[in-house]
Image: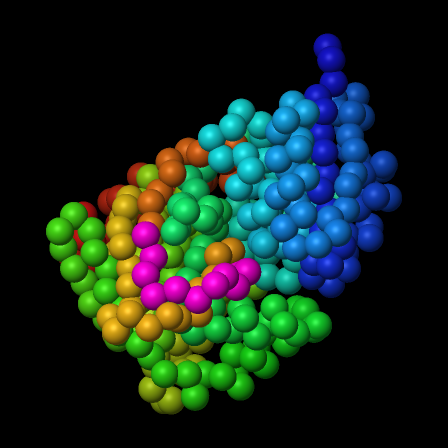
Amino acid sequence: MSKQKILFIINPHAGMGYYKKVHRLLKKHLDISKYDYELISTQYQGHGHVLAMEAVTNKTDILIAVGGDGTINEIARALIGKNIVFGFIPTGSGNGLAHHLKMPIVISQAIKVINEQQILKIDTLKINEKICVSIAGMGFDAYIAELFDKSSRRGLFPYLYFVIRSFFSYKPRTYVVEADGEKKEHTALMVSIANSSQWGFNVKISPQASMQDGYADVCFTKKPPFYHLLSSAMNLLMGNIHRDKSAIAIYRFSKCIIYEKTHVNQPFHIDGDPMERQSRLEVEVLPESLKVIVPKKQYQKEFLKHKQYESSFNTTSCLF
């Protein structure tokens, strides 16, 4: 049986520098009876996408992103609708997609998952013609992404520093979502477009989100008063924010338009990477458009989650 051709694209600037262990651990743990493998490091932002496109042309069987959510996005967006299998070893700061899909953060364990090669077809999103794999947003979280991107520090505590420093001065805006002739309007701190459940650091904005149901969640998060800050933070960390109707409104869509009511450009991010500021987002779900390697246990959970979500979601809060 011929071996599969597998390419590891490594972002040497991601997260806390854990990528340095990848070369050594691949030699130790990757099943070379299955794979012929190659490693390439990115040289600049966007280089991962260029390398991925070249790999598609060269008929590579599997592409593995080694980095954070931004690196994952660069590489995965070259594979949308393609037959090439995508995988990732999370070495970023937040690792939102890894937490959602229960991909091990420990590199050696992530390599073992790649060896098992359990493949799940997941949805992705197209937002203003750009691909989003996990989560996008407009407003406060995107503003923090801008600050974090300019900083040389990585990890949870620098991120929290920017959140705390900016929270009280950042002003909510009024946002509108339109779908199927209906409109919903909210004054919110931010609007999150969730294909997966969380931003990263295991902080869940839409805990019931599924990547296999053909929908994404549009989450309008209000700015809590000072006396509710602690309870709101705990709800985010414990995965209960969706239960607090005074703090968040969640709608489900397959296609919609979101815009800031006065059409003023707002901070905007895709998968944690800041984009050019926007006032209007055209959003479409691309069902089962990416073949991704996941742990076997998570394959079963994700496959069934959207059915459970359909039965448990409060339909009075839905556009559809």
Residue 143 can be seen in this image: yes
Give the residues drawn in magenta, as a range. 272-282
Drawn side of residue 36 relative to residue 54, left or right: right
What is the x, y in percent for residue 192?
38, 62
Q: Nearer the viewer, residue 310 or 193?
A: 193
Q: Residue at x 59, y 47 (%)?
A: 74
What is the x, y in percent for residue 140?
43, 74
Position of 29 relative to 177 (above/below): above
Drawn side of residue 51 relative to residue 181, left or right: right
What is the x, y in percent for residue 51?
68, 39
Name the image quarter holding residue 184. bottom left
What is the x, y in percent for residue 89?
67, 46
Q: Quadrant of the N terminus?
A: top right
Residue 161 among magenta residues: no
Residue 244 can be seen in this image: no
- Total marks in image: 0
